Image: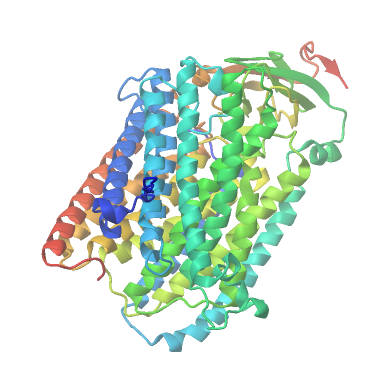
């Protein structure tokens, strides 16, 4: 008699099996991510000090640190905002913790690979790694390949997050179109139960679609660069790959803001006691974002005069159009939610409001830069890091901090201490940003180890503000940590 | 400090004034939370205001787009505006210098044909006072055409404006601009 065959049951990895509840998982990721932001901020301060001649750095070291700072910050900010959106939607959309684990692990591995390439190999073509510079530098060839694999891992991690989000939306609302609330416009899409996606889900739907398109383009980019790395005979057109690089780089950085909008829609009502409601205007505005955000990349190539004119002019038009939903719906809607509300002013709500202001002020600067005749005197000057530091550091990062404050619980907030921390942090932030703007308007080039005047004196002042900013950030993170422990000891989780 | 004039001055004034307006609006909203009201009481006014704001903002964007389309730096816009034939100057960027004439005439339309022999570079023209006047990218395998007229004589600076490697900061060189007719031309050809 033949022995019965024992079939091994497939073993699925569940985050819960390894003791990772969603809250613990998100808490760990926030801790690692915020720690990384601090370290990368220190690197930014070191670069400023070197530009101000306060310390000496070899140009190769400076550009390697610049590469690490840029690639690390973008990846970490994307990671942190993704985790925040995942947390606020995971119950509603039945998102899978194990998918988040895979996503976080892939992004962290990508960051590790990029860090080794930079710190051990000295890889330094900046985080935009414009072809053919990665293949013509003084760094060893292995560091080039390792960095590209790192970028691929970061892209894969973000794609896993987008897939999970999309699957959750389809499970809950029947289709991604319903997730975008197109059923408010198209009656035949309406669900029998009349359930309409809330604004945070609309934002998540847009992020999932555009995120996957972005990662697909990024994958083509990295595969082409890796093919050239394996075989230098593999032909690459410099203009084509420049377009692809900025399509990927611009859109993924820009999406961090749209991920944050989903978090704002969920959390701001907790402080104001009022709710965002889905309607036709929200659905239309996010449809505009869905189509026009990915079309804004040509504004990075305005100074490539050989680019097709329709792309240049279309890039300006798309960039303009993409700002309408953000300005008229999300930012205006947030202000309306706060206006004459019984607002509970806590560290989280202050950070969210300040972040929206940073988003707007940085957005104004971005719009000026995206206007072609102005771009001719702003492109690749310090105006560029000025505007994106304003809406990433002074916008998206404040949303991450605001979310963290909400996540650890806003009870037992030490009022005076928090005020002192906020003043320190914001003084450092505003002063640091203003030095960038001053440099930009003075025509000081970005990405220079040694800058022409008045770059060095502005860098000296900026270094002081960076120190103040980092002191404020450390104090804020310590206060969050203490508050988290105290609230956890009292059995209180997130919220007010 | 470099003098702030021309487009840079317009940009600075626009950014400061628009940022000040939105900051004041934010502070006003923050202050309004001292006198809470029911959401229903403010919502309909808010939606009306939003509609108005949408129209104003949209109109501003259309005006800005219409104005800028006539002042673009591209050949199709500049050629149409040119009143005299241009002097063609070829520029080749390398890590970390430019191959180009060392002197050019003032107040003559120059057609810079810019390319790169290796990686991506930028070709930025700075005035003798250090003001960034114009720029174009230098890309391998492609030729970018920049039309530019030097407003007066002096020593201008040509500076790379795209990060191109370890020597990027040092990639700049002087360009003597003379009054037309005061010096023999060293440009490649006259169109």
Residue at the spot 56% in from the left edge and 19% down from the top edge: A135
> Number of callouts in the render?
0
Q: Is residue B128 in view?
A: no
**The C terminus of chain A: image quadrant:** bottom left
- Would you say A372 lies left or right of B12 here? right
Q: Is residue B123 in view?
A: yes
- Would you say A421 lies left or right of A211 here? left
Question: Horizontal and vertical percent for residue A188?
Answer: 67, 79
- Residues B140 and A79: in front is A79
The correct choice, above or below, for A13 with respect to A186 in the image is above
Residue at the spot 36% in from the left edge and 61% down from the top edge: A87
- Residues A42 and A453: in front is A42
Question: Horizontal and vertical percent for residue A149?
Answer: 48, 31
The correct choice, above or below, for A375 with respect to A17 in the image is above
Question: Horizontal and vertical percent for residue A457?
Answer: 38, 31
Residue at the spot 71% in from the left edge and 19% down from the top edge: B91
- Residues B43 and B172: in front is B43
Residue at the spot 31% in from the left edge and 49% down from the top edge: A29
Question: Horizontal and vertical percent for residue B136?
Answer: 67, 31
């Amino acid at each position: 008699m033949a022995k019965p065959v024992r079939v091994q049951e497939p073993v699925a990895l569940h985050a819960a099996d390894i003791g990772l509840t969603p809250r613990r998982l998100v808490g760990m990721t926030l801790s690692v991510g915020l720690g990384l932001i601090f370290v990368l901020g220190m690197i930014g301060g070191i670069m400023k000090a070197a530009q101000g001649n306060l310390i000496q750095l070899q140009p190769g070291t400076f550009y390697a640190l610049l590469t690490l700072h840029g690639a690390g910050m973008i990846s970490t900010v994307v990671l942190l905002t993704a985790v925040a959106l995942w947390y606020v939607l995971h119950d509603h959309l039945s998102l899978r913790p194990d998918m988040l684990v895979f996503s976080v692990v892939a992004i962290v591995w990508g960051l590790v690979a990029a860090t080794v390439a930079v710190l051990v190999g000295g890889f330094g073509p900046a985080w935009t790694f414009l072809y053919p510079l990665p293949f013509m530098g003084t760094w060893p060839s292995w560091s080039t390949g390792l960095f590209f694999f790192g970028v691929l891992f970061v892209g894969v991690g973000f794609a896993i997050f987008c897939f999970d989000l999309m699957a959750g939306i389809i499970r809950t609302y029947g289709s991604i179109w319903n997730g975008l609330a197109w059923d408010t416009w198209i009656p035949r899409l309406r669900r029998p139960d009349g359930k309409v996606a809330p604004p945070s889900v609309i934002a998540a739907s847009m992020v999932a679609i555009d995120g996957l398109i972005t990662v697909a383009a990024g994958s083509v980019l990295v595969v082409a660069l890796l093919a050239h790395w394996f075989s230098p005979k593999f032909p690459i057109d410099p203009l084509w790959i420049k377009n692809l690089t900025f399509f990927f780089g611009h859109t993924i950085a820009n999406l961090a803001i749209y991920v944050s909008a989903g978090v704002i829609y969920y959390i701001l009502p907790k402080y104001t006691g009022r709710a965002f409601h889905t309607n036709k205007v929200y659905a239309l505005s996010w449809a505009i974002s869905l189509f026009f955000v990915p079309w804004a990349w040509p504004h990075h190539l305005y100074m490539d005069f050989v680019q097709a004119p329709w792309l240049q002019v279309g890039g300006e038009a798309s960039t303009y159009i993409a700002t309408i939903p953000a300005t008229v719906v999300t930012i205006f809607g947030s202000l309306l939610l706060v206006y004459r509300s019984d607002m509970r002013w806590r560290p989280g709500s202050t950070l969210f409001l300040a972040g929206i202001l940073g988003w707007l002020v940085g957005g104004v600067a971005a719009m000026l830069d995206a206007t072609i005749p102005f771009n001719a005197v702003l492109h690749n000057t310090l105006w560029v890091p000025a505007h994106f530091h304003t809406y990433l550091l002074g916008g998206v990062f404040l949303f991450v901090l605001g979310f963290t404050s909400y996540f650890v619980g806003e009870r037992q907030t030490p009022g005076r201490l928090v005020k002192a921390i906020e003043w320190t942090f914001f003084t450092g932030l505003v002063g640091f940003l203003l030095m960038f703007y001053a440099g930009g308007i003075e025509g000081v080039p970005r990405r220079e180890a040694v800058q022409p005047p008045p770059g060095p004196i502005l860098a000296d002042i900026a270094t002081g503000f960076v120190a103040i900013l980092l002191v404020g950030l450390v104090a804020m993170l310590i206060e969050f940590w203490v508050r988290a422990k105290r609230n956890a000891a009292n059995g209180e989780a997130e919220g007010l | 400090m470099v003098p702030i004039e021309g487009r840079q001055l317009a940009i600075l004034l626009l950014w400061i004034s628009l940022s000040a307006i939105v900051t004041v609006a934010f502070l006003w909203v923050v202050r309004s939370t001292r006198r809470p009201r029911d959401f229903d009481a403010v919502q309909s006014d808010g939606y009306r205001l939003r509609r108005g704001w949408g129209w104003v903002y949209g109109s501003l964007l259309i005006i800005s787009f219409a104005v800028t389309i006539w002042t673009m730096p591209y050949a199709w816009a500049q050629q149409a505006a040119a009143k005299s034939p241009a002097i063609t100057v070829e520029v080749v960027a390398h890590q970390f210098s430019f191959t180009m004439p060392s002197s050019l005439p003032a107040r003559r339309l120059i057609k810079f044909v810019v390319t790169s022999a290796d990686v991506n570079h930028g070709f930025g023209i700075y005035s003798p006072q250090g003001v960034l006047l114009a720029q174009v990218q230098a890309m391998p395998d492609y030729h970018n055409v920049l039309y530019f007229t030097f407003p007066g004589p002096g020593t201008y600076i040509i500076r790379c404006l795209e990060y191109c490697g370890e020597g990027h900061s040092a990639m700049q060189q002087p360009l003597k601009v003379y009054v037309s007719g005061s010096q023999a031309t060293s440009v490649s050809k006259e169109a």
